Image (spheres, helix red, strand yellow):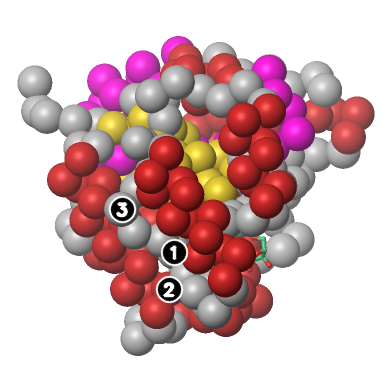
Amino acid sequence: MSVIALHGIRGGTGTTSVTAALAWALSQLGEKVLAIDLSAANLLRLHFAMPYDSPRGWATAERAGSGWEHGAMRYNSRLDFLPFGQLSGAEEGLVSCDWQNNLTKLRNTNVYDWILLDVPVGEPLRAAQAISMADHALILLQADSQSHVRLHQQPLPVNCHYLVNQFAPVSQLQQDILLLWQQTLPQLLPFTLHRDEAMAESLAGKQPVGELHPQSKSSQDIITLANWCLINLRSMPK
Ligand SMILES: Nc1ncnc2c1ncn2[C@@H]1O[C@H](COP(=O)(O)OP(=O)(O)OP(=O)(O)O)[C@@H](O)[C@H]1O
Ligand SMILES: [Mg+2]
């Protein structure tokens, strides 16, 4: 089992959309996947058609004393997801969960090939902790000047991979920044995820992009990403 933490270099880079899309694409390639939402914003679930009003999730289950596992949901026979759950701001502060221990339990069950963690921006300590528990980290970037400054200015996990999302080849500046990163960032993935209306519609349609728009550019991009993960990040059976 491989645990991948997906994390934006800043908010809004597309981490949640890409987590849902990658989870679905891996499941279509025959892998067993669990996607876990570590963000109290609780949005990942909406990419998996969960009713908006349902408060179900790992944090709500923990808060109710029934255990985080009881928040899990099944999307299809190879894809499960664990929403954060809907809590009030005051309640959020009271929930703590030992994810290191939970991941060890999940590893021991041998049920999943992949666990994807949607790691939120804005809580640096929690994010660092989540990334340190993962086997691999994918840091999402947008090819703009702000991301470039942040790459040099803010602490970043070591041994992470960088993935450009929302790439628009019509932009000269984006092309230039991508070229610069290709020359200077050894851990940059050798492909980008393009800016595409199909990806933007994923949340509106409450489905991962590959399922909602199978013929789209984003769907092809995500299949490339899923295959790259299979080749490069898959843990070898012991
Ligand atoms: N490749 C893409 N092309 C077009 N739109 C995209 C793409 N990726 C993400 N988006 C859009 O960008 C917005 C932010 O996406 P998302 O919520 O996945 O980002 P996030 O990094 O998880 O944000 P947050 O930091 O708030 O958790 C959404 O409207 C989403 O539809
Ligand atoms: Mg998000």
- 94 vs 23, nearest the viewer: 23
Q: Which residue is drawn at 38% across and 45% down?
A: 183
Task: Give how far apart the Cα atoms at labels 3 and 2 are.
Answer: 16 Å
Q: Which mark is residue 73?
A: none
Q: Which residue is drawn at 51% across and 23% down?
A: 157
Residue 171 vs 225, above or below: the answer is below
Bounds of the magenta span?
A: 101-127
Q: Residue 193 carries which label?
A: 1
Task: Give how far apart the Cα atoms at labels 3 and 1 are.
Answer: 11 Å
Q: Which mark is residue 190?
A: 3
Q: In which quarter of the image is the C terminus?
A: top left
Residue 102 on the magenta segment: yes
Residue bearing mark 2: 218
What amino acid does circle 3 point to? Pro
Ligand 1 is within 8 Å of the C-beta of the residue at disc 2 = yes
Question: Badges 3 and 2: C-beta atoms under 8 Å apart?
Answer: no
What amino acid does circle 2 point to? Ser
